[in-house]
Image: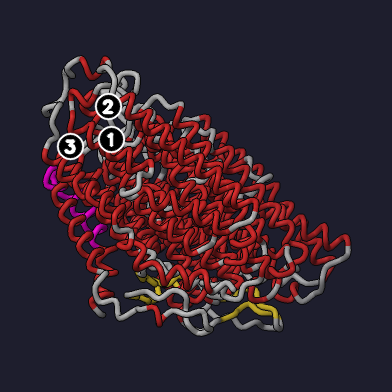
Amino acid sequence: MTQSVDHVALLPAYLAAGTAVLVLLADLLVGRRGATLAVAAVGAAATAAGASFVGAGPDRATLCAGDACSYLAGDRAALVAALFALLTLGVLGLSARLPGVPAGEYAFLLACSMAGGVVLGGAGDLITLIVALETVTLPLYVLVGLRRQTVASAEAAVTFFVVSVVATTLTLLGAALLYAATGVLHLEPLRDAGPLDTPLAAVAAALVVAGLAFKVAAVPFHAWAPATYDGAPLPIAAYLSTASKLGGVVAVLAVGVVALPAERTGPVLATLAVLTMTVGNLVALRQVRMVRLLAWSSVAQAGYILAPLGAAAFAAGRSAEAQNLAVAAAVAYTVFFVVLELAAFAAVVALRPAGADGGPIDAYRGAARRRPWVSAALVLALIGLAGLPPGLAGLFAKVAVVRSLLTGGAGWLALIVALNAVIGLAYYVRVAAALYAPPQPAPAGPAAAPGAPWPVLAVLAGATAIAVAAGFAPQWVLDLAS
Amino acid sequence: MTAGQVLLVAVLAVPLLGAAVAVALPDRAGRLAATAFAGVAFVASAALWWGRDGVGWFRYGADAGRPAVQPWHEVDAPWVPGLDLRLHLGVDGISYPLVVLTALLTLLCCAYTVWHAPAGGPGRTLAALLLVVEAGILGTFLALDLVLFFVFFEVVLLPMYAVIAGWGGAGRRHAARKFALYTLLGSVLLLVGVFTVVAAAGTADLVELTGGGGLSRGTQLAAFTLFAVAFAVKSPLWPLHTWLPDAHTQAPTVGSVLLAGVLLKMGTYGLIRVAVGVAPLGAREAAPVLGVLAVAAIVVGSLVCLAQTEIKRLIAYSSVGHMGFVLLGIATLTATGISAALIGNVAHGVITGLLFFLAGAVKDRYGTGELADLGGLRERAPALSGLLGYAALASLGLPGLAGFWGEAFAVVAALERGGPLWTALAVTAAVGGALTAAYLLRLLRRVTHGPPGPAVARPPGVGPRGVGSLAWPEVVAWAPLVLLALLLGLAPALVLGIAGDPVAALLGTDS
């Protein structure tokens, strides 16, 4: 039996994979750092353009076996693919000055991860989903360890590798058991396969969700995140907290909402959401290192993303309209979140010397006097993550989540989200105030870092501009998400 | 676009534009530009009076089909349909006095900044932040869409935090953080309340929702509770008031004036417009609780004031007491009560604004606000001491000055309600009023009368201006408030004349 393959639907995946190959060739033939990164950047931009082009057209499906298709190139797939490509582009810009890191391998690994993300958006069955998610994460094991000659980086890489492999094992086991219980692997048919009330199916569903919760860094599967973010090079920490988290969210959405029945996953996701946001916020209050604080804050933000999905725990939240609203709110929040998080990390990269890690928060005291515009962008990003004006993008993100929760009848969950926003402000405002505090006396040592290279500033400016635009016209994000 | 619509948008856009311009210019020019933009905003806000298209008593009515909110001018444009957010602005008799008061106080604060910017950062940034706060407060008063109301409610938070944290006194960081966290707690509860209503009613339009909007009793009670707690943090209502003394004491003079003068009014206005307007059944159920807490605020506020030793902190706690009278008026849910609340709002804004200006002047001249160090001011600085006495008398509710109407008629409204609870509340509130007089007269005795204290007797080493007399910029800044306190005291119809019909319509629709 031959299977027809719709190559137009697969165009973004081809472009992403082609970028990876081209980057290797460019590194081999030209061998200059700037050229390699430029090729990678052009490839990422082309992937984003290709994804938008395919998404603007009619919905396509390919690699089908009968009715069930393994690759669904619809609007949401295009959005995810474009986001991955743009985030990779941003991280490439942030990597403009990384001493001691081989450019070809670095860009190749990032492009491979991007290719995994592009396919993840359109995954139509469990195996494609898991393979794509692994393709996103596998290159990151190496990339995290690339801040050489530091123990922290090697530790981070090993921690991440071990935890991630265990998580993937759990997910694979769960997928296999699910296939054994239902005989179905594709996502849409799985939803129609029935309520999954056998013990085997229940265990399988729990294993799959648990494994995916690792990827999103949901509590109690979050312990790897702060150590990994802190040890990794700053651009890779940015990629982990934006693109990798996006991949985890897409996988949870695909499995938790589309494939598995809402009665089972609703309470689980609600519990995960509450634990994640509360623990993330409370522990972030105690952090003294910048990247660890951002890592814990992104753990808490994952809780806000999962919260609308938890509304399915209530009967009112399981109606089709409420489900659609919940998924749209989760996707919209993710989009706002990755833009603001990328802007925050870009500002941190711009404020730190080349190749350094995030450093303690005290190192940023008085930064507003030395670098007023970069500090203003960092404050805007942090306040947006807290969900207050002038970071209107973050405010509308929280409003969307609360709205979907209350429409789905999950009032107490909305209250918990609201209270967590207050805890979140406490540490975001502490960092923002530190930027404007009087600077510490200059330590005897190397002079202050010179101005950041232009790609870093370009990424910062671009991310901030998109955040501000999304703040004043959030409707286009909400339209994209629904 | 009619002229009224242009004015509505201008009232919001001009301060934001002014903030951007002020930050871009060098220091002194920036402050002058900020004052100019504040002046334009004030003129625009006052001009909203004209062109109200014959909104007379016959437009209102409790019969079906007549909305209870009839704005004089209205702007209604879609913004974010996916979040039920529309740019729906409007001004009517309830919000107009507060809008003009906000614009006036901001103008006076910006003008004061031109003359004397506190230490801590460039004066132009302070003036710009004041303008952003003004835009947020004006937006709250003008919003006729619940989600828009929430957005503007949030806009005020961070600029005010920055004002306190950047230009405040010794304990400013802690005070600013407490202010930010407490206010955000109120705001997020407001968010949950707003979407409880929107999810149940399907619309966020205040005009449609006023009078209950067809919500069930349970939803109204839940919504009113959330709204009431949110606005109780802002007003503030005892026992959620603990952010206020630190914030007012540590803020710079202009910050305290805006905080006490108008920020607190966002809470009481929200209670009237949003909580009572949208959830009247819930309001009726919760009114006794609100009344008891309000009277507790009056008594506790007054007793704590009697023990205060620092002038700014004393005035801050006096705000708790005065807002207690306003909240008692609202809790009675009678036309007298709400009218008393409205005039009490405006009067408190004028008088406490003036008091904070004067306290700031005393601190600048003598370097301290401690009552033990001050005294005998009427010999060394007779004009300043005279104004302080005038403001204190206005604050304690002397008939003929603005403060009388709010305090007296809140008590009258509680008596009108009748029944054992409300009569007891009225009597306790009246006793609280006597305690108010007690602490304010104590303030005058310690500061203006008596032998000169150590800070007053010793000629202050610092200070570029003559201590005894008032500088003319101070006179210019304070004169409007002094005049308004007298004018409102003699002619409360300036505020209540336009508010009568909207209040009656608001209360008439819940039957």
* Disc nearer the start of the sequence (3/1): 3
Q: Position of residue A444 (x, y in %)?
A: 30, 19
Instruction: Say which residue label 2 marks.
Output: B448
Q: Amino acid at mark 2?
A: Thr
Left or right relative to A159: residue A459: left
Q: Quadrant of residue B27?
A: top left
Tell which subunit mark 3 falls on: B
Q: Amino acid at mark 1?
A: Gly
Instruction: Say which residue label 1 marks.
Output: B389
On whether residue B29 falls in the magenta region, the answer is yes
**Compared to B67, does B239 lie above or below?**
above
Q: Which SS class for mark 2? A: loop
The one nearer the camera, A178 or A261, is: A261
Residues marked 3 and 1 touching at CB (< 8 Å): no
Which region of the structure is painted magenta? B14-30
The circle on residue B116 is 3
Name the quarter where the N terminus of chain A is drawn: bottom right
Q: Main secondary structure of the magenta part?
A: helix
The one nearer the camera, B84 or A189, is: B84
Residue located 46% across and 38% down the image:
B434
Q: Position of residue B40 (x, y in %)?
A: 18, 60
Residues marked 1 and 2 touching at CB (< 8 Å): yes
Residue located 88% across and 60% down the image:
A199
On whether residue B370 falls in the magenta region, the answer is no
Q: Position of residue A13 (x, y in %)?
A: 51, 69
Name the quarter where the C terminus of chain A is drawn: bottom right
The circle on residue A73 is none
Q: Amino acid at mark 3?
A: His
* Disc nearer the start of the sequence (2/3): 3
